[in-house]
Amino acid sequence: MTLQDNIEKGLGAIVDEDSATTPKGSSTRAVHGGTKRRKAFNSLNTPIVQTATYTFGDTQELIDFMERKTWGDGDDREEYGRYGNPTVSAVERKLAALDSGEDAVLYASGMSAVTSLLLSVLPSGAHIVMTDDCYRRTRQFCLTFLKRLGIETTVVHMGDYEAMEAAIIPKKTRFLISESPTNPYLRTANLEQIARLGKQYRVLTMIDSTFATPINQRPLEWGIDFVVHSATKYLSGHNDLLAGVVTGRADRIKGLRDARGVLGGIVDPQNAYLLDRGIKTLGVRVGQQNKTALAAAQFLESHPRIERVWYPGLESHPDHAIAAAQMSGFGGVVSFEVAGDLKTTSRFIDRLKIPYIAPSLGGVESLIEQPALMSYYEKTTEERLALGIKDNLVRFAIGIEDTDDILNDLEQALAGI
Ligand SMILES: *Cc1c(COP(=O)(O)O)cnc(C)c1O
């Protein structure tokens, strides 16, 4: 199935009945997508509806609501804050429009999105196939928490689609999970291949698209069933909140929303507002981050004190061809190996003046980390190597500072080691 078939089938439909314009481009969607043109009190911005519960005028109003809900038609008002909130719903409609999904469901963090999706959908005794080089907590959730519930996970090497197909156990495997691009090596999954395997074996597919954002890649358009983002990163964009989202087909998202009412991971209305505010500038932010990251990757690749650069926009990256076919930009994260040991690499990081040393990515401020000392501190060099994490590896999450300033900062820091 081609991208065009999927768009024509309706997956590309923009949920935007209310808007006077039908936004097509990603930046227009980020500002207007899914947004009602007229809002309460004629406010231009989506109001923050700061309430834990909602009132009924009298018993008859309550009974009418319950009757409509029983008939599956009760969505014109909210009942209780764990089930829904108008500020949260407005951001969900925008995220659905951005990802070319029919609907979206927001959670209190990216991990809440991942864990709620899997807990909501998987039956006991199910089996998952997952690619390696994935977010450490997602892997931990599948390999320890879900295992305890009798759900087994097979991890296959990213890019090995024969191994992925061979790992599928017919009727038992329920989910194919991958990230794209991955952390920290920016490996890029072949979305069409994964969607095809999912359809062939009737297995649901999920892509964690956090590193790409809907500006650079929209996996639903390639036939993927669920897209997950940690909205903490690029979507919010200002390192000031945690949130997560799942986008996909309306009936499936409705199921997740119902389950969220039980699991409890809804985002709060203040954070939903801040997220909406952040999303409006997603297009310009990601555009700048794509540009600086490519320039930084090229600069680093030509520098004698850098051993290797991992960036899907470089021809040297193992997934460059697939990334170029699927993505309209290569993202704001560049990983690289410094010529030297753990200490030399730390010295380089300490000499940088612009990026902060911090985990996370996707905000306006550049952040840098040495994975060996951040996510994998408690492991030995050998254990880290077994997980593919070298001591001299650096993950640089580029912000929206001027490209030249970033390049100059890298140059002066490398000159001093
Ligand atoms: C950060 C991140 C998560 C987890 O998101 P939180 O919002 O921190 O819970 C999941 N996947 C990827 C790829 C991430 O970068």
Image (spheres, helix red, strand yellow):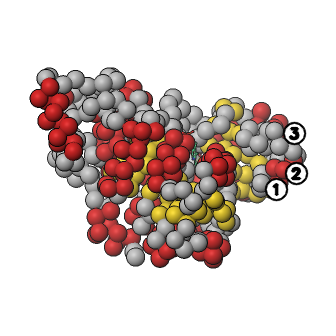
Q: Position of residue 264 (x, y in %)?
A: 44, 35
The residue that mark 1 highlights is 386
Left or right of 32 in this view: 368: right
The residue that mark 2 highlights is 382
Q: Which residue is drawn at 63% across and 59% down?
A: 152
| Lower sequence index among marks 2 and 3 | 3
The residue that mark 3 highlights is 343
Mark 3: which secondary structure? helix
Mark 1: which secondary structure? helix
Nearest-to-viewer mark from 1 and 3: 1
What type is the residue that disc 3 sits on? Answer: Lys
Q: Do the residues labelled 2 and 1 touch (CB within 8 Å)?
A: yes
Quarter holding ligand 1: top right
241 over 306 or under it: above or below: above
Name the quarter where the N terminus is drawn: bottom left
106 or 121, which lies in front? 121
187 over 30 or under it: above or below: below
Left or right of 287 in this view: 164: right
Mark 2: which secondary structure? helix
Q: Position of residue 268 (x, y in %)?
A: 41, 29
341 or 120, which lies in front? 120
Q: Residue at x 87, y 47 (%)?
A: 381
Q: Residue at x 31, y 39 (%)?
A: 89
| Lower sequence index among marks 1 and 3 | 3
Left or right of 246 in this view: 356: right
85 over 196 or under it: above or below: above
Q: Distance between the residues labelled 2 and 3?
A: 16 Å
158 over 381 or under it: above or below: below
Res 6 visible: yes
